[in-house]
Amino acid sequence: MKILVIMGSPRKGNTFRACEDLHEQMQKDIPVTFEYLWLQDAHLLPCRGCLTCFTHGEETCPNKDDAIAIEQKMHQADAFIFASPVYGMNVTGQMKIFIDRFSYVFHRPRFFGKKAFLLVTTGVLGAPSVLSYLEKVARIWGCEVVGKVGLITPGLDSGKIVTKNEKMIADSARVFTKSLQNPRKKRPGLWDVIIFHGQRGAFSQLEKISPADYQYWKSRGWFNPGARYFTDVRVNPLYHGIGKILGSISARKIQKELKN
Ligand SMILES: Cc1cc2nc3c(=O)[nH]c(=O)nc-3n(C[C@H](O)[C@H](O)[C@H](O)COP(=O)(O)O)c2cc1C
């Protein structure tokens, strides 16, 4: 199993050590390799805000850098770890540049079948909200988020915190390993189904304004009348009903905006 660690920390510090500990624990149960994508060293320029990746495809991005190669690397991995320290109550700038540059994936999700584990370290505050943010990103990109851990890094009361972190890493390793061994496709939750129908309603109206989104969705059959989700998986009928209603509201809202 090949795990790509998308590393938001600029240094081999707490976040890297936590990933290495996780690796060591997981290797006790399954053969697993961790490859690090150090965002600090990647040639990934900040988004310029032109929106052409959304409307006309990622290949039209004016930034000529390693984004496409990074996406290919992501496709080659079995699973991802999104790893970041908390900086200013959020992910690091390196991680944010990465997420911004791959924003087209929010519109054209493509990482179905990839499991994602989220790992955040912090001095004191911010881990829950950063984990929640990363979870939204990973899920909209198509990943199945199989676990997450927020670690407070050792400070004054280091003995107790080290023991607690070791336990949290060991528990995380078990959860991540178990999920990698389980081929079963997870059924989407209500939130995932709402995202599907909300986007479906919107993009179905955007053939002229955002042809890249429109064509991507069309080519995958996601506009077909019977489409229930991005992938062939059972969807809770109640979630489907709610999603359909919200999808038509979303389509009507866009139609109205286009008329004005
Ligand atoms: C620029 C910067 C901003 C930080 N912001 C926060 C913060 O908002 N909340 C917090 O509790 N810790 C904050 N920290 C502490 C780090 O989250 C914490 O030390 C983390 O484990 C560092 O990970 P690293 O060793 O991989 O860089 C900050 C550290 C730095 C360098």
Image (tube, helix red, strand yellow):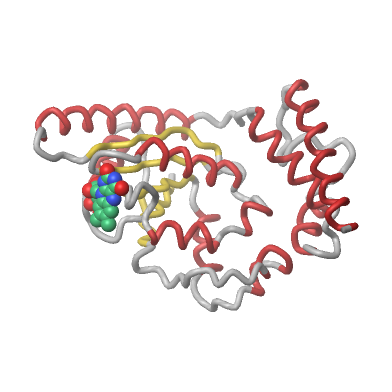
Q: Is residue 66 above or below residue 195?
A: below
Q: Quadrant of residue 249?
A: top right
Q: At 54% across and 63% down in the image, what residue appears? A: 101
Q: Is residue 237 above or below residue 181?
A: above
Is residue 19 visible in the rendered image? The answer is: no
Q: Position of residue 195 (x, y in %)?
A: 68, 40
Q: At 46% across and 38% down in the image, what residue appears? A: 132
Q: Is residue 45 left or right of residue 210?
A: left
Q: Is residue 219 left or right of residue 30?
A: right
Q: Is residue 177 above or below residue 116?
A: above
Q: At 40% across and 35% down in the image, what residue appears? A: 148
Q: Position of residue 183 (x, y in %)?
A: 56, 32
Q: In the depicted view, which residue is nearer to us: 197 or 260?
A: 260
Q: Is residue 41 left or right of residue 153?
A: right
Q: Position of residue 150 (x, y in %)?
A: 33, 36
Is residue 109 visible in the rendered image? The answer is: yes
Quadrant of image for the N terminus? top left
Q: Position of residue 120 (x, y in %)?
A: 34, 43
Q: In the depicted view, which residue is nearer to us: 87 or 119?
A: 87
Quadrant of image for the C terminus? bottom right
Q: Is residue 185 left or right of residue 123?
A: right
How many numbered discs?
A: 0
Q: At 50% across and 40% down in the image, what residue appears? A: 135
Q: In the depicted view, which residue is nearer to us: 128 or 196?
A: 128
